Amino acid sequence: MGAPTHSDLLEGHTLNVDGASNNKGSKFDIILTTLEGTITEQSYTLGFPTTNNKAEYEAVIVGLRMVATLRVTKLEVRFDLLLVVSQVIGEYTIKDDRMADTCKSSSA
């Protein structure tokens, strides 16, 4: 087996995202791990009050935008809120119009 090609290096990335919101504020973290094991970690503080779900969505949106600049062709996204995962992949419907708009942004 030879050295990985440029195409191989663009596959197999993992994006871990986590958002949280409480009475002290809202934030989210993004961790991108490449095939080679390089880790890029970013933390963001949201400048507006929000819910845990919205913080999770913001993390997914920013993480996917970050990955899009790298031309990654294969990506595993990991996050811990089953509700958000189910809404993003279309298994659950979203009743709140603002959350529906946020979900559309995450899957665009």
Image (tube, rainbow, N blue to C red):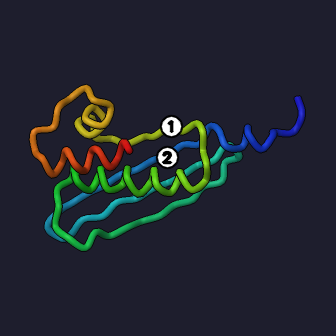
Q: Which residue is mark 2?
A: 15
Asked whether, in this view, residue 17 is left or right of residue 25, the answer is right
Asked whether, in this view, residue 75 is left or right of residue 78, the answer is right
The quarter of the rendered structure image containing the N terminus is top right
**Quadrant of the image occupied by residue 84:** top left
Outermost residue to the right: 2
In the image shown, does 100 or 86 lie closer to the viewer?
100
Instruction: Give the residue type that dot 2 points to.
Output: Leu
SS class, disc 1: strand
Instruction: Give the residue type that dot 1 points to.
Output: Glu
**Do the residues under discs 2 and 1 have CB atoms within 8 angstroms?**
yes
Outermost residue to the bottom: 47
**Position of 52 relative to 5 (above/below):** below
Percent of width and height locating residue 4:
81, 39
**Position of 68 relative to 94 (above/below):** below
Q: CA distance from mark 2 to mark 1?
A: 6 Å
Give the crowd class for mark 2: few <14, some 14-19, many >=20 residues within 10 Å.
Answer: many
Percent of width and height locating residue 91:
25, 26
- What residue is drawn where x is 10% and y is 39%? 95
Q: Which residue is mark 1?
A: 76
**Marks 2 and 1, the one that precedes in the sequence:** 2
Asked whether, in this view, residue 61 is left or right of residue 95, the answer is right
Asked whether, in this view, residue 106 is left or right of residue 2, the answer is left
In the image shown, does 66 or 55 lie closer to the viewer?
66
Percent of width and height locating residue 2:
89, 34
Give the crowd class for mark 1: few <14, some 14-19, many >=20 residues within 10 Å.
Answer: few
- What residue is drawn where x is 42% and y is 65%? 43
In the image shown, does 78 or 57 lie closer to the viewer?
57
Percent of width and height locating residue 66:
50, 57
SS class, disc 2: strand
